[in-house]
Image (cartoon, rainbow, N blue to C red):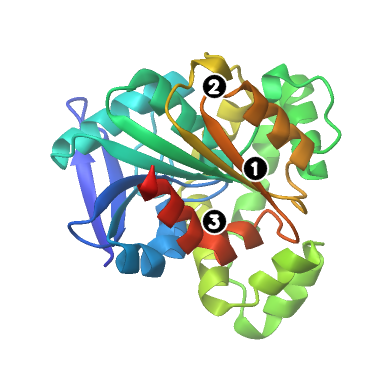
């Protein structure tokens, strides 16, 4: 099942979302990564349908089909989720967050403890603003953080320059070369040779860039800013999944997060990386999430 819908707000803004999996299944809000968009949830479509899970995947403000929200903060996200689930007449729900979706899941759990039953974090981003040692982060992220702090206008210009190239759809025959150029872990490269997985990851990224460079930039800025809460404030059950070969966020950073969460069960998976974990283990991740 895939259906694109829109929720309109009183100020005229809209949030676009798509649904995957089972129409009347257990509701799970999907928080996409960065740079990405709601169609990343295609990764969960088939296993969700088999498990009786309803995936509701919104584009964040400024991403693809959703309106820009000037000066948005992470603290604004739970109100958007509340409007979405009220519109869908959903009471209690779970959250599945991939990579850059992690802070949005945590923020929603802190703001709506009576409605967020449990959350699953897969290869989740860490609070950069509190980080003193940037080793263990993807070099691109270290570079972007340095520019954000010292040359923010140049970084914005680079985002606009990159947009035409990152909106380009890679021809099928060039995909092996494209994956080589990304210098991925072998496990990640192998998992992305699957056409459906490749499309779920990279088409969702293209949708974000095609929407606007400003929207992608606004989404990126959230990660560099303080999240506004401590990890100890997240009281909902957390299922934290992290690949031991994750190149984006070293496993030691994920371990630090797990140790701060008061109600967390962490699983560090051998021979899996930042992409391969969600691609290869989605059914297991969803099955565990709905069992909480």
The local crowd at label 1, few if under 14, some if 14 to 19, many if 20 or more residues have their Cα within 10 Å, is some
The quadrant where residue 220 appears: top right
For residue 45, above or below residue 171 = above
Q: Is residue 72 visible?
A: no
Question: Horizontal and vertical percent for residue 121?
Answer: 53, 41
Instruction: Return the residue nearer the eye: 2 or 235.
Output: 235
In the image, is residue 189 above or below residue 59? below
CB contact under 8 Å: marks 1 and 3: no
Quadrant (top left/top right/bottom left/bottom right) for the C terminus: top left
- Write the residue at 71% across / 28% down: 256
Looking at the image, is mark 2 or mark 1 nearer the viewer?
Answer: 2
Residue corresponding to mark 2: 262
Q: Is residue 265 left or right of residue 51?
A: right
Q: Is residue 223 visible?
A: yes
Cα distance between the residues tagged 2 and 1: 38 Å
| Mark 1: secondary structure | helix
Say which of 172 and 242 sits in front. 242
Earlier in the chain: of badge 1 and badge 3, it is 1
**Is tag 2's residue or tag 3's residue first in the polypeptide sequence?**
3
Q: Residues within 10 Å of mark 2 (few under 14, many from 20)?
A: some
What's the mark number on residue 159? 1
The one of 166 and 125 positioned closer to us in this rendering: 125
At a point 24% along the width and 37% down the height, the residue shown is 84
Q: Position of residue 239 (x, y in %)?
A: 52, 40
Q: Secondary structure at mark 2?
A: loop
Query: Alpha-carbon distance for marks 1 and 3?
Result: 14 Å
Helix, strand or loop status at disc 3: helix
Answer above or below: position of 249 versus 77.
below
Whichever of callouts 2 and 1 sits on the residue coming sooner in the sequence is: 1
Which residue lies under the disc numbered 3? 205
Between circles 1 and 3, the one closer to the viewer is: 3
- Distance between the Cα atoms at labels 2 and 3? 33 Å
């Amino acid at each position: 099942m895939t259906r694109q819908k829109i929720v309109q707000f009183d100020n005229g803004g809209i949030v676009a979302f798509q649904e995957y999996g089972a129409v009347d299944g257990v509701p799970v809000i999907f928080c996409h990564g960065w740079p990405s968009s709601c169609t990343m949830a295609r990764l969960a479509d088939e296993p969700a349908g088999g498990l009786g899970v309803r995936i509701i995947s919104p584009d964040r403000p400024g991403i693809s089909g959703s309106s820009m929200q000037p000066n948005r903060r992470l603290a604004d996200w739970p109100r958007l989720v509340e409007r979405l689930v009220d519109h869908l007449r959903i009471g209690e729900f779970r959250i599945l967050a991939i990579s850059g979706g992690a802070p949005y899941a945590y923020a929603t759990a802190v703001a709506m403890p009576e409605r967020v039953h449990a959350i699953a974090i897969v290869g989740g981003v860490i609070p950069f603003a509190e980080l003193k040692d940037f080793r263990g982060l993807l070099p691109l992220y270290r570079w972007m953080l340095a520019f954000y702090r010292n040359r923010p206008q140049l970084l914005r210009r680079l985002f606009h320059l990159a947009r035409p190239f990152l909106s380009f759809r890679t021809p099928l025959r060039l995909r092996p070369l494209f994956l080589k150029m990304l210098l991925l872990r072998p496990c990640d490269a192998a998992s992305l040779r699957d056409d459906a997985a490749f499309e779920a990851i990279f088409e969702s990224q293209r949708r974000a860039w095609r929407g606007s460079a400003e929207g992608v930039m606004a989404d990126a800025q959230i990660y560099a800013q303080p999240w506004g809460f401590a990890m100890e404030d997240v009281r909902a059950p957390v299922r934290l999944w992290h690949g031991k070969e994750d190149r984006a966020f070293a496993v030691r950073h994920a371990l630090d997060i797990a140790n701060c969460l008061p109600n967390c069960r962490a699983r560090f998976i051998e021979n899996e990386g930042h992409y391969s974990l969600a691609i290869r283990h989605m059914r297991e991740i969803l099955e565990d999430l709905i069992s909480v």
